[in-house]
Amino acid sequence: MQQPDKDRILGLLIGKMPVREFESWLFKDLELESRIGSDMYFDLIDIDYRDSNSSCIVSQTLMGKHIDPVELKDFKYHKVLEQAGWYHGRKTEQTVTSKKLTPELKNARDILTEFGGLELISPYKCDYWTPRNICFPETIERLSHGVKYGLDKPLICFAHIDDFNSALYIDDENNYYLLDDIANIDLFRFKGNELSTLLQNLMGLDEQGNFELTGSSNRK
């Protein structure tokens, strides 16, 4: 399947392409069957697009058979990034440029070089587990230390989530942490290795990885 055709189908599945526009493309493109294959093509034209649930029916028809759920998840994630202003090869100028950066500062700087100044908006309704947004400062603004949480290493803040209710930190080994930015009581470590997995998890796109309690500061 050619990428433009796949993008149209995935766009419908994540609600970014109107059903009428999709239907028109489906029936007017005379070469579409040869590009996407007869099996998928006839599955698609058998659907009644006048049905108010037609986009859900398309999803039920294609997922697992013609469309890999992981591919759909990644497509949705990159749409969130693109809507925020991200693009491949994005690099912002960082004021922290010393050649003698500590590992944790370098790790945070690398993240902000790509994401600094962006605000990612969750594609799902905000609830207790899914924050409304993830905001990356333009440069490193906050340094902390994990000692009061039983973690003997410095931590660097690289993002704020849910309108500054919580913050994300990174250490010298590229471990990611979440800290309640209001009470600053519980520090959680993300059980995953990739930043993309962390961001997808927070936005409700991926259930892989979760957070475990690292330690708690003394409650006052």
Image: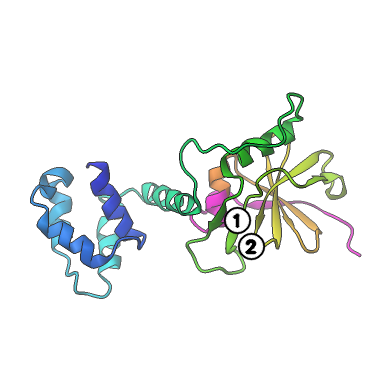
Q: Secondary structure at mark 2?
A: loop
Work out whether residue 77 can be spotted.
yes
* Along the viewing direction, whichever of 201 and 144 lies nearer the viewer: 144
Residue at 58 percent of width and 48 percent of height:
198
Using the image, determine if residue 165 lies above or below residue 7.
Answer: below
| Residue 172 in sight | no
Reply above or below: 198 against 219.
above
Q: Give yes or no for residue 73 being in the magenta stretch.
A: no
**Dot 2 amino acid type:** Asp
Q: Position of residue 185 (x, y in %)?
A: 81, 59
Q: Position of residue 213 (x, y in %)?
A: 73, 53
Please tell me which residue is depicted at 62% across the width and 68% down the height of the picture: 128
Q: Residue furthest left?
A: 30
Residue at x 32%, y 56% (from the top left corner)? 11
Q: Is residue 106 left or right of residue 203?
A: right
Q: Give the quadrant of the C terminus.
A: bottom right
Residue assigned mark 2 = 162
Quadrant of res 59: bottom left
Residue under numbered circle 1: 134
What residue span does the magenta drawing correspond to? 199-220
